[in-house]
Image (cartoon, rainbow, N blue to C red):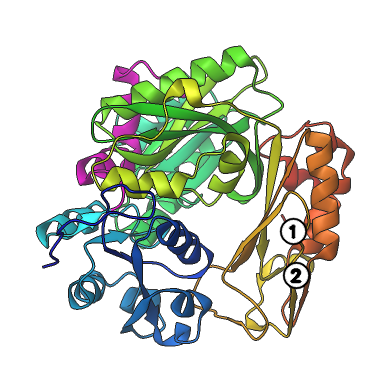
Amino acid sequence: MADRGSHYGNEGILLFKKILVANRGEIAIRIMRAARELGVQTVAVYSDADQEALHVRYADESFPIGPAPSTLSYLHIPNIINAAVQTGAEAIHPGYGFLSENHHFAAICKTWGLVFIGPPADAIEKMGIKAQARQVMKEAGVPVVPGTVGTVEDGAQALAVAETLGYPILVKASYGGGGRGIRVVAGPDELEDALERASREAKSAFGQGDVYLEKYLSNPRHIEIQVLADQLGNVVTLGERESSLQRRRQKVLEEAPSVAVTEVIRQRMSEASARAAKAVHYSSAGTLEFLLDDEGNFYFMEMNTRVQVEHPVTEWVTGVDIVKEQIRIAAGLPLSISQEDVEMRGWSIECRINAEDPEQGFRPSPGRVEVWREPGGPGVRVDSGAGPGYQVQPFYDSLLAKLVVWGQTREEAIARMKRALWEFEVEGVKTTIGMHLKLMEDEAFAAGAIHTNFLAERLSGA
């Protein structure tokens, strides 16, 4: 087991000497950058497919964890724990995806004397079971979408509840996320098949087939609130992000703040989010996700108990380094900011640049990157693990880079994103850069008239 000892980082605060980053690509590098600024050493882990990856070269040291398939490497808990023990790491940062919301992994880290840089295992478990999370939120006074209390036992119960709610309804997997295990049901004749399909998909993806029902909201916005909570009971919210632009329930573009959120709505959503975090004794970074209707009503969807892909837009408008705060919190330190310190300035937009072909139904485009020229200039940030010669692997998520911009106004941010997308050159694999350029030119997007079905209505193949 690691010897914690004592270590004062570059900012003169008591921190870890060394952390292991149990991830790959851009998020691994993002975490390592934060650690380096804090004076903390990092260990990269890598599969056979990632031996030459940028995150491996960036870290202070690296450790192999198995073959290319993620089940044999990045998701293989014994290999991750062994890497931490062998390298003398004191803590593990899981990033997002992979093991980041696995409460068993968080508990195992503790057993081995390793600090999990994330929330407590029981908080992950409570919020990871969506039907259970809904009940916890209701008890905490957080609005939830009308639906079943707990999971659906059988088809007869589902029919009865659906009649009460009124169609259309959603059948949703109780475990997991990422849009899997969800079906929209227009009428009673579709319900049985939707229950079966959603349950089967959820069991295949998450190992659990439990489902529940929710009232389907037509064309809502997807709004999320960033939360930071320390181990001393302090909770701070960092405003909202607009995440309505999605393709098959996978986010494509995010921005902060949202054109639809007034100061009053922001205050109400932030207060509800703080109550939610306190209700599960949360610590670390987390995100409360809500649906917002045209009348300003919002409803809890889920809580992501990890750092989000889209965290940079919040960092840019608030000036708060969310990953640094995660590391500080895990070391037992109080939050470095109070709620009174939080002020949202300007506007930030993030485009996810994926190795996919929009002209072919967003088919993944593995292969070798022959040309890679990133944009630059004022107000432009690129978080990426790719570059010239980078091999896009078929085993992992197709995200190549997160292109993030900041402007004094939303109009300036859109203009800046257009310019940055125009500068971004990638050859050798297909990318979604062109799709994002089309979005920037879209009049409805420019007007902020967006919702969760916006892309499906406007882009072929979305």
Residue 459 locus on image (x, y percent): 79, 52
Task: Check residue 360 in the rendering and tell me which mark sits there, or answer none.
Answer: 2
Mark closer to the chain start, 2 or 1: 2
**SS assignment at label 1:** loop
Label 2 neighbour load within 10 Å: few <14, some 14-19, many 20+: few
Residue drawn at point x = 24 percent, y = 57 percent: 7
Residues 411 and 218: in front is 411
Residue 2 is one of the magenta-drawn residues: no
Residue 335 locus on image (x, y percent): 35, 34
Residue 98 locus on image (x, y percent): 38, 63
Quadrant position of the C terminus in the picture: bottom right
Residue drawn at point x = 23 percent, y = 42 percent: 332
Please identify the quarter of the rendering in which residue 385 is found: bottom right
Dots 2 and 1: beta carbons under 8 Å? yes
Residue 122 is one of the magenta-drawn residues: yes
Residue 123 sits above or below residue 431 on the image: above
Label 1 neighbour load within 10 Å: few <14, some 14-19, many 20+: some
Q: Amino acid at mark 1?
A: Gly
Q: Main secondary structure of the magenta part?
A: helix
* Residue 81 located left or right of residue 66: left
The answer to whether residue 149 is visible is no
* Residue 310 located left or right of residue 86: right
Q: Amino acid at mark 2?
A: Gln
Residues 197 and 12: in front is 12
**SS assignment at label 2:** helix
Residues 152 and 118: in front is 118
Please identify the quarter of the rendering in which residue 21 is found: bottom left
Quadrant position of the N terminus in the picture: bottom left
**Residue to which mark 1 is pinned:** 461
Task: Check residue 290 in the rendering and tell me which mark sits there, or answer none.
Answer: none
Residue drawn at point x = 71 percent, y = 33 percent: 346
* Magenta-colored span: 117-145
